[in-house]
Image (cartoon, coloured by chain):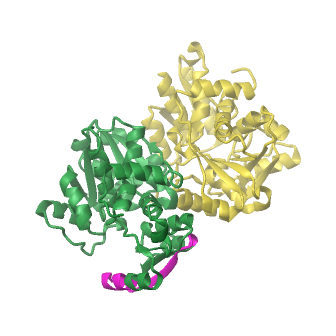
Chain colours: A green, B yellow
Amino acid sequence: MINEPDFYGILQAADRIAPYIVKTPLVQSASINQLTGARCFFKCENLQKAGAFKMRGAANAVFSLTTEQAANGVATHSSGNHAAALALAARWRGIPAFIVMPETAPLIKQQAVKAFGGHITFCQPTLEAREATLKRVQEETGACFIHPYDHPEVICGQGTAALEMLETMPELETIIAPVGGGGLISGTLLLVRGTVRPLQVFGAEPALADDAKRSLQTGILQPAVATATIADGLRTALSPRTFGIISEHIDDILVVTEENISRAMRLIWERLKLVAEPSGAVPLAAVLQYPEKFAGKKTGLIISGGNVQLPG
Amino acid sequence: MINEPDFYGILQAADRIAPYIVKTPLVQSASINQLTGARCFFKCENLQKAGAFKMRGAANAVFSLTTEQAANGVATHSSGNHAAALALAARWRGIPAFIVMPETAPLIKQQAVKAFGGHITFCQPTLEAREATLKRVQEETGACFIHPYDHPEVICGQGTAALEMLETMPELETIIAPVGGGGLISGTLLLVRGTVRPLQVFGAEPALADDAKRSLQTGILQPAVATATIADGLRTALSPRTFGIISEHIDDILVVTEENISRAMRLIWERLKLVAEPSGAVPLAAVLQYPEKFAGKKTGLIISGGNVQLPG
């Protein structure tokens, strides 16, 4: 827990979480290749347990706790996939999970946490209320805080997705991962840069939530801004830790339009027959928007999750 | 082409089509198991090439033709998945495919056939016009007619889906396949009955298109009736050949409500993160509607296809 995340931490994570997670498939579509001019390989983390790559980081964090550290359970604040994943990982370990959620969190997310046995404490939908509530819950329970992305073992867990991609398709030339808080892209970068292969790694984020791009350009960590992007999982800002890893290792951050995110979701549905959440379609949106960067290249795209609220 | 379909024909088909088709995954969901009380294993033919199991039968039929038989191409009448699958199989073999389609066929189906290089001839949306137009096309081109389901090699091809299911999960106790024209369920029955394992095999069809159930009950092949079921792939009637196989071998046909078909589609989306067409959700609808038949049983369900027209 005290070490910074690195390549070897990812290898250890892969071993640690193997009994719990799904080795998700890497799928292709001839028609998407024809349309984009790239050779796309989609890593289906929407088929991961709890419906998102967050399962990897949460499982790794929970199972790397010592018996003492784990004794009083784990806690986090999240209105998204990390909350459900942490609740499930805690259930597997047989410890309680305390989740602080804004009262405005979608019902489907609340239900997922409850279904996995998590204890929800609601708070006002502000950062201050969230942090104050989490602090109170930790004081009352003694639970160990597992941050959604600013956490070494979470980052190492997320890196196992890219590890599996290279195991399945060692000749990949490029990998694209969506960027929200930066946990997935950081794990991906640490994994790839720990190998001798000259892969390019791109982050992708909505133009409406381009704080990572602007952080990279200015060299100063930019805060999240209120945004209406449909890629709700990517509205978060980077942390100092993930910003540092990204600054050091990334080839570039590609920003994409909402229109291309919608086009990408539709292609994933129609051609791959898979349900992706908007955030999970952002890497394909980057290939649609910057085809010249990927022409003819074996490109790995991480479909980060599949948790969408259905109408009706 | 002259033999009736049987177990050995299916084994040959598996060998013949192996270079062309996808060995689709067999997936599970803990929450669907909890909800239904069954142990469900979903065969993902929505992830098959051209988006449906029809690829298996079409590929087997096309590649079992002699050079002479194949010389002038293949022809069929279909407004659905068989048309696209036949066009793709013909392209692989390097021969033309002539597809007779009603003018009313959905644009997405027309586009799929064209994308695979098929030649479309439109006709009035009646059975008579369809058959007359097909006859004319055959006379003009000399193409070999590949019926969508009343065809021995098509039935053998469809049986390879169940073969893969048993290879992956030999301890299956029950298999459920949707019933339209009867090609898939016939292939499934011939495969299962050719093994010594005591599997139950059920067909599933919408109550609004229950011609197979009534055929089985009366012992007389019932014609298709005009129906508004959302499971558009299952509106077809059986043929004498598929009716014969089903009568001899099936455990039962389970009819399901439209409401359960919708519930099943939603579950497949939400829990499996997969896009199924309504017909492909009909086996799960049967588990939802008749839970007592499947309680605790290892049940294989064929998600027959994923080709749905998206709104917008």
Which residue reaches farthest front? A68
Q: Position of residue A53 (x, y in %)?
A: 42, 57
Report whether A222 appears left or right of B80.
left
Q: Position of residue A173 (x, y in %)?
A: 29, 39
Closer to us: A100 or A37: A100
Report whether B28 appears left or right of B195.
left
Which residue lies at the image location 56% right of the left edge and 40% below the top edge? B24
What residue span does the magenta drawing correspond to? A115-133
Which residue lies at the image location 50% right of the left edge and 44% below the top edge? B109
Closer to us: A203 or B21: A203
Q: How many marks?
A: 0
Q: Position of residue B74 (x, y in %)?
A: 56, 25
Q: Where, by quadrant of the figure, is residue B147 drawn?
A: top right
Q: Where, by quadrant of the figure, is residue B154 drawn?
A: top right
Which residue reaches farthest left? A218
Relative height, residue B163 to residue A134 (above, below):
above
Q: Position of residue A145 (x, y in %)?
A: 40, 73
Which residue lies at the image location 28% right of the left edge and 52% below the top edge? A286
Relative height, residue A81 to residue B103 (above, below):
below
The stretch drawn in magenta includes residue A117:
yes
The stretch drawn in magenta includes residue A216:
no
Which residue reaches farthest top? B68
| Residue B121 appearing in the image | yes
Closer to us: A281 or B255: A281
